Image: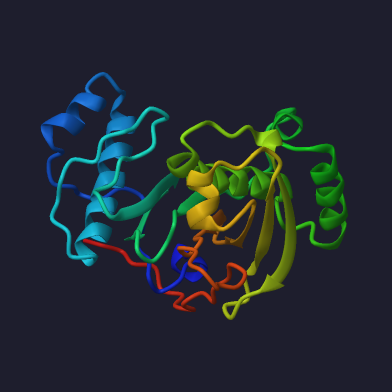
Amino acid sequence: MMRRLLPDTVEVTEVRGELSAPPLFPEEQAVVARAVDGRRREFATGRRCARLSLAALGLAAQPLLPGPQGEPRWPAGVVGAMSHCDGYRVAAVARATDLAALGVDAETAARLPDGVLEAVSLPEERADLARLGRTAPEVPWDRLLFSAKESVYKVWFPLARRPLGFEEARLRFTRERDVAGAVCGRFEVRLLVPVPAEFSGPVGGAGLTGRWLVDEGLVLTALAPVVRRAGDGPDSFEPAGRAAVRHPG
């Protein structure tokens, strides 16, 4: 399903449940040595998905260790992101010559617990979600906002190298339906903080456009800003349109 939100330059591996994975590298095993069994399986499946996506780019398997904020440290010349929720794992990668950064997030399509929306949103965003909820009550708009902000963070942090608070990005959503009949759309991002050159150079300013999808009990969001070059127009892409989910064995 994430495939439907990303351009053809991105390699995506997504799976329901867990994968039978080859052993982790020793360095990776050390990361989850004291974790509970469920976390170890989740970690191993995520790394397996990432290695399959990297292999599709022609890259050999190597340790994928977490960085200072828990983000995966990708091989040189690669941008990528991973996400997981109950029963779903995804890893997406692309060459840094094609995309400036990559953010994906997956959530269960359920309302946020009480009090969480107020902690992750701006008053204007809550007003927007209330209006959207009256026209499309089947969409868990609060969970969608949370997911989209997670995707924004995954694009922001590798370039800006500092955290981004939930209140430091203003999101607006539009709605449509995809070819499979699922509810989907786009979201516009306006960053509300000074944007460092390390971010604005490759991304092209303080504005981003992402895509979202609610289907099969999941909320999925993705941001894939292309590398900005002199003379480029607004950031946009048309998704590949391939609805098949890759289920690696």
- The C terminus appears in which quarter of the rendering? bottom left
Please report the residue visible at 23 percent of the width from the left and 49 percent of the height from the top.
48
Rendered location of residue 215, percent (x, y): 58, 62
Rendered location of residue 20, percent (x, y): 20, 49
> Who is closer to the viewer here, 227 or 74?
227
Whether residue 86 is visible to the viewer of this picture, yes or no, is: no
Question: Image height check: is 48 above or below 66?
Answer: below
> Who is closer to the viewer here, 239 or 178?
239
> Who is closer to the viewer here, 124 or 98?
98
In the picture provided, is 42 more to the left or to the right than 205? left
Please report the residue visible at 87 percent of the width from the left and 54 percent of the height from the top.
131
Instruction: State the scheme by which the image is colored.
Output: rainbow
Q: Residue furthest top?
A: 34
Please report the residue visible at 45 percent of the width from the left and 54 percent of the height from the top.
102
Q: Where on the picture, by quarter, is residue 134?
A: bottom right
Question: Image height check: is 247 above or below 118?
Answer: below
Whether residue 103 is visible to the viewer of this picture, yes or no, is: yes
Q: Where on the picture, by quarter, is residue 173?
A: bottom right
Please report the residue visible at 39 percent of the width from the left and 37 percent of the height from the top.
71
